[in-house]
Amino acid sequence: MRSLEDCRLYGFIDEAYRQGRSYEALAKALCNGGVDIIQLRMKEASLESILKAALIIQPITSAAGVHLVINDELDVASRIPDAFLHQGQEDFFDAGHKNVRDLQACTVGSNLRLGLSTHAPEQARKAISAGADYIAIGPVFATPTKPTANPVTLEYVRWASKNVSVPWFCIGGINLDNLDEVLQAGAQRICVVSAILNAANIEKECAKYRSKLETYFP
């Protein structure tokens, strides 16, 4: 698997955009299309359902050399080999955690890897101090995935390009029409949700983003 530093394209299997497609089919399409990371996001599902889906997806991502990230649920992430956990500010800090070690203490072993969402420079600094392995920066643009969230704009991207020391991924409303703007603002890694999952051919759509990224980072 690539190091986080070398990862460029972060895809999603989001229950809100699954549209009846199987987890296996989505995972294969994303991997074949060139993602480096897949996050499983099932906001309204039971832990049992999330674990079941993760156990379907993990052998596919592992064989493809793609990182698997579990959204929110520590109990699931800790049971999936080599999985990352991704949490929002409220899930991590508002729950009383101050450092990734707080979560590691709740799991068997101590190798849990964590990504945190951030929406402002002060949150980025706090997440890095907490030991996050990577952070997400966004939403950069308005997005149907987070309809009530205010866009952080490209100014936050420019700030991150100069001030963030861990791998960071731009997320939120990114598509092929605005991708150049995001990359020219200093981004090196992107997350794409609806623009890929709503495509008629997910694998081909992923490949378009991969191709664009490779023109910037050959």
Image (cartoon, rainbow, N blue to C red):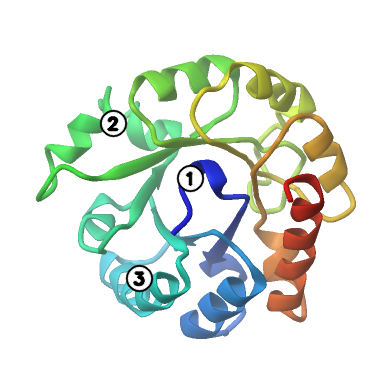
Query: Which secondary structure lies at badge 2?
Result: loop
Residue sitting at the far front: 218
**Residue 44 shows which numbered tag?**
none
Q: Is residue 61 left or right of residue 30?
A: left
Quarter of the image with the N terminus in it: bottom left
Residue 210 visible in the snapshot: yes
Label 3 sits on a secondary structure element that is helix
**3D distance between C-alphas at marks 1 and 2:** 26 Å
Percent x, y of residue 124: 51, 22
Q: What residue is shown at x 74% (from left), y 69% (from top)?
A: 207
Q: Does the image show residue 18?
A: no
Picture layout, residue 74 above or below residue 103: below
Mark 2 vs mark 3: in front:
3
The reply to whether discs 3 and 1 touch (Cβ–Cβ < 8 Å) is no
Q: Disc 2 designates what residue?
A: 95
* Residue, disc 1: 4
- Examine the image and state in which quarter residue 29 appears: bottom right
Residue that badge 3 annotates: 54
Q: Quadrant of residue 10?
A: bottom right
Q: Assess whether mark 2 and mark 1 are in contact (beta carbons under 8 angstroms).
A: no
Please report the residue visible at 79 percent of the width from the left and 65 percent of the height from the top.
Answer: 208
